[in-house]
Image (cartoon, rainbow, N blue to C red):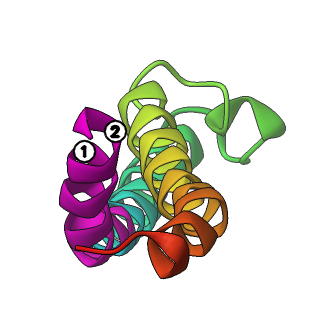
Amino acid sequence: MITQALAGLIHGVEPIISAAGIALLMIGLVGNAYELRKISKTMVQSTGTTCFTAFLNKRNWKWYLMILISLALFGLSFAHAETVSPMLHTVKF
């Protein structure tokens, strides 16, 4: 009985989890691009060239983490939809 109620509750939150995942992904990608542009400009001014280490700069890690969390949320919503939805069709509310 409790699992049926919990499955119904989580099933209603799936669109919110998906929307949050998509929003975090967009914010993370735009923020990462903006940060990379700033890092590249700084590298060009100081050394005259850009290099691959711009991707490994510690200012980018927050954006990488945000993108990773968004992909996890988005994957969680789809993984949950595939495992719970067949159960909900057989449950009589």
Question: Residue beneath label 1, please?
Answer: 6
- Hey, which residue is sitting farthest right in the picture? 52
Is residue 3 depicted above or below 85 in this figure? above
User: What type of secondary structure mainly makes up the magenta span?
Assistant: helix
The residue sitting at 72% across, 47% down in the picture is 50
Element under disc 2:
helix
Residue 66, horizontal then vertical, whole percent: 38, 42
Contact check, label 2 and label 1, Cβ < 8 Å: yes
Between 31 and 25, the one nearer to me in the picture: 25
Question: Residue beneath label 2, please?
Answer: 3
Between 41 and 84, the one nearer to me in the picture: 84
Is any part of residue 20 visible from this angle?
no
Please tell me in which quadrant of the rendered image residue 53 appears: top right
Q: Tell me the amino acid under the disc marked 2.
A: Thr
Between 86 and 77, the one nearer to me in the picture: 86
Q: Tell me the amino acid under the disc marked 1.
A: Leu
Q: Which residues are magenta?
A: 1-21
